[in-house]
Image (spheres, rainbow, N blue to C red):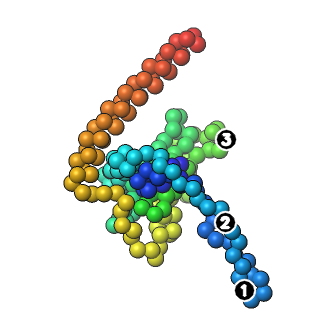
Amino acid sequence: MASAYAAFANRGMYCTPIAIEAVTQRVGETKKSLEVPKSTCSRAMSEGTADTINALLKGVVDSGTGQQAGLGDRDNAGKTGTTDERRNAWFVGYTPNLSGAVWVGSATQQVKMRNITIGGVYHELVYGSDTPGPIWKDAMTGALAGKGPSPSSRSTSPTRTRSARTATSRVAALATTTATTTATATRATASSAA
């Protein structure tokens, strides 16, 4: 999920994740660098589509369910998530130069995230915003400590903003259509099975 969201920050370019930046070993008094894998990048979506998604996901941390994951004056965006029956809660977010995902749940899917104590704090219900979001914020704050804010990769020019608003309406309509289609398909499958 983190690498998928990194493509939004990268204005539509998806790059394969590389967990290792460098490997060095001491050979006598000199260090020998070992080769690390290279990332490959390809266009996953248009810049316009990525800009629209960035605007929507920025709204989640600025004024939506992900406010607890906001990084103050550092540009960031993300999405909260809670699965059916409260077995999992997520927050996936990114800055212009770093992306990360936090999952809180039961690996066996046997424990529901309700009436549960996590890290000494009792939760009647666990949402992506109240546990994974703050964990993500703490991790990103630590990872970005001492690094100046990166310039946003998202354009804020009036032309881009106007395009984003128009595209946002289309995305919302598409999401509604997709949800309706999925619900209809699920009902049809359930009816066929009965």
Kindly identify the residue that appears in the image at 69 percent across and 76 percent down. Answer: 33
Q: Is 21 located above or below residue 46 in the figure?
A: below
- Nearest the viewer among 178 and 103 is 178
Which residue type carries mark 1?
A: Thr
> Disc 3 or 1, which lies upstream in sequence?
1
Residue at the disc numbered 3 = 108
Q: Quadrant of residue 174?
A: top left
Eye-nearest disc, 3 or 2: 2
- Nearest the viewer among 62 and 11 is 11
Residue 92 lies, in percent from the top left, at: 48, 51
> Disc 3 or 2, which lies upstream in sequence?
2
Is disc 2 surrounded by few (<14), some (14 to 19) or many (20+) residues within 10 Å? few
Which secondary structure, mark 3?
Answer: loop
Residue at the disc numbered 2 = 36
In three-dimensional space, the C-alpha distance between marks 3 and 2, rounded to whole angstroms, equals 34 Å
Q: Is residue 149 visible?
A: yes
Residue at the disc numbered 1 = 30
